Image (spheres, grey):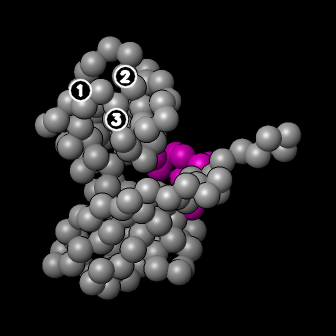
């Protein structure tokens, strides 16, 4: 079992602190890695119920804030719906995924997850005027 560190970055230059998740497998498809990340984020939100959801993608019915997504009406987030939103966002180039220094381009592509690997989710930000 190894620890994978997830880090969120934007093309505007911001970089999150990163957080770890234990993954038992040494190889995993990107689709499954995204699913596990999202399910972990949703479980953390459900257990603590903070004012904002800090996750990979914006839940339906939420408003973007400086530090996450605020739900207009506090409610449970469905991890399966949230996973589908994340997978669609990846397919629409909403974010790129880098494992170590290698970009993963397909959801069903399997990747090596050596102990301590950093997985970067690079969220693409539209440029002003372009």
The residue to which callout 3 is attached is 53
Point out which mark residue 59 bears. none
Question: Which tag, 3 or 1, sits closer to the chain's start?
Answer: 3
Stretch in magenta: 86-96
Up-down relation of residue 67 to residue 76 (above or below): below
Residue 10 placement, left or right of 41: right
Up-down relation of residue 56 to residue 102 (above or below): above
Point out which mark residue 76 bears. 1
Give the structural element (helix, strand or loop) at label 3: strand
Give the structural element (helix, strand or loop) at label 1: loop
Give the structural element (helix, strand or loop) at label 2: strand
Up-down relation of residue 104 to residue 100 (above or below): above
How many marks can you see?
3
Up-down relation of residue 121 to residue 49 (above or below): below
| Crowdedness near tag 1: few (<14), some (14–19) or many (≥20) residues, C-alpha within 10 Å | few
Disc 3 vs disc 2: Cβ atoms closer than 8 Å?
yes
Image position, residue 121 (x, y; %): 49, 60
Residue 107 seen in this snapshot:
no
Image position, residue 90 (x, y; %): 54, 53
Disc 1 vs disc 2: Cβ atoms closer than 8 Å?
no
Q: Which of marks 1 and 2 is in front?
A: 2
The residue to which callout 2 is attached is 71
Q: Nearer the viewer, mark 3 or mark 1?
A: 3
Question: Residues under labels 3 and 1: Cα distance?
Answer: 11 Å
Image position, residue 25 (x, y; %): 23, 77
Q: What residue is drawn where x is 16% and y is 35%?
A: 48
Q: Does the magenta stretch include residue 87?
A: yes
Residue 124 placement, left or right of 30: right
| Crowdedness near tag 3: few (<14), some (14–19) or many (≥20) residues, C-alpha within 10 Å | many
Locate the N terminus by quadrant: bottom left
Q: Nearer the viewer, residue 96 or 13?
A: 13
Hey, which quadrant is residue 28 in on the image?
A: bottom left
């Amino acid at each position: 079992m190894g620890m994978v560190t997830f880090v969120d970055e934007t093309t505007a230059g911001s970089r999150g602190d990163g957080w770890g998740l234990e993954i038992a497998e040494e190889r995993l498809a990107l689709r499954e890695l995204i699913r596990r990340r999202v399910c972990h984020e949703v479980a953390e939100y459900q257990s603590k119920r903070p004012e904002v959801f800090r996750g990979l993608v914006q839940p339906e019915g939420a408003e973007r804030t400086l530090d996450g997504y605020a739900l207009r009406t506090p409610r449970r987030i469905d991890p399966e719906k949230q996973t589908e939103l994340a997978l669609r966002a990846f397919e629409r180039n909403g974010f790129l995924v880098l494992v170590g220094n290698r970009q993963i381009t397909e959801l069903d592509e399997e990747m090596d997850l050596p102990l301590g690997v950093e997985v970067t989710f690079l969220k693409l930000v539209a440029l002003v005027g372009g």
